[in-house]
Image (cartoon, rainbow, N blue to C red):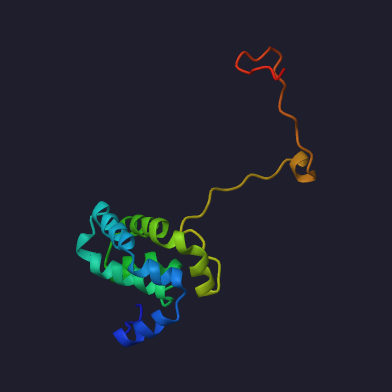
Amino acid sequence: MPKKYTQEQFWKLYEKLPQELKDALFAEETGNNISEICKRNKVEENLEEIVDYVGQVLVGVLPPEDFQETIEKELNLEKEVAKKTAHEINRFIFYPVKPVLEQLYGMEITPSEKPAEMKEPSSAEATGDKEKPPTPSEKDAYRESIE
C-alpha cells in the first residue's frame, strides 16, 4: 500500500521537483486527460484516488511501474480495467515527461507491456551485409526523368 503523505510533506517534495514535473502536476491538460481516461474505462467513481496516485508518481514517491498494480489493488479494479487505465495514463501523462521521471527515479522506465519477440538476425544481418532491394525490370511510369 502506498504511503500517505501530509500536505506539508507533499509540498516539500514538490519544491524539489524539476519544473517540467511541476508543470505536468498542475496542468489543466493533465486533469482533463485523467478525467477522460476514467470515463472511457468506466472508473469515474475512482477519479479522485487515481489523480492522487498520478500525483504520487509525478512527485517521486510511487514508481511508475507500480502504478497499475497499485490502482488494481487499492481501488479493487479488475485486472484488465486497471491495465487499460494504467496504459492510457502512461501514454498521455507519464510518457511526455518520461526523461524527467527517469532522472527522478534514477532508472529507465519501461512500458508495462513487453514488446513482441524479436527474430534472430540472419547471417547477412549479423555480419552487416545488406541485401540490395530488387531492381524493377520495367520503366516506372510514375517516376519523372531528371533530365
The quadrant in which the C terminus is found is top right
Q: Position of residue 32 (x, y in %)?
A: 28, 58
Furthest toward the front, the residue is 147
Side of 57 relative to 144 (left or right) = left
Residue drawn where x is 42% and y is 62% of the image? 94
Q: Is residue 60 above or below residue 135?
A: below
Which image quadrant is residue 128 in? top right
Residue 109 pos. (x, y %): 51, 65
Residue 93 rendering spot, x and y as whole percentages = 39, 61
The quarter holding residue 45 reads bottom left
Q: Nearer the viewer, residue 6 or 128?
A: 6
Say above or below: 37 vs 56. above
Q: Is residue 27 left or right of residue 21?
A: left
Q: Residue at x 52, y 69 (%)?
A: 102
- The quarter of the image holding the N terminus is bottom left
Residue drawn at the location 33% of the way across and 55% of the way down: 80
Q: Is residue 22 above or below residue 141?
A: below
Q: Residue shown at 61%/47% (left/top)?
A: 118
Label count reads: 0
Judge by depth and name the residue closer to the eye, 32 or 120. 32
Task: Judge by depth and name the residue closer to the eye, 84 or 137.
Answer: 137
Name which quarter of the figure residue 140 lies in: top right
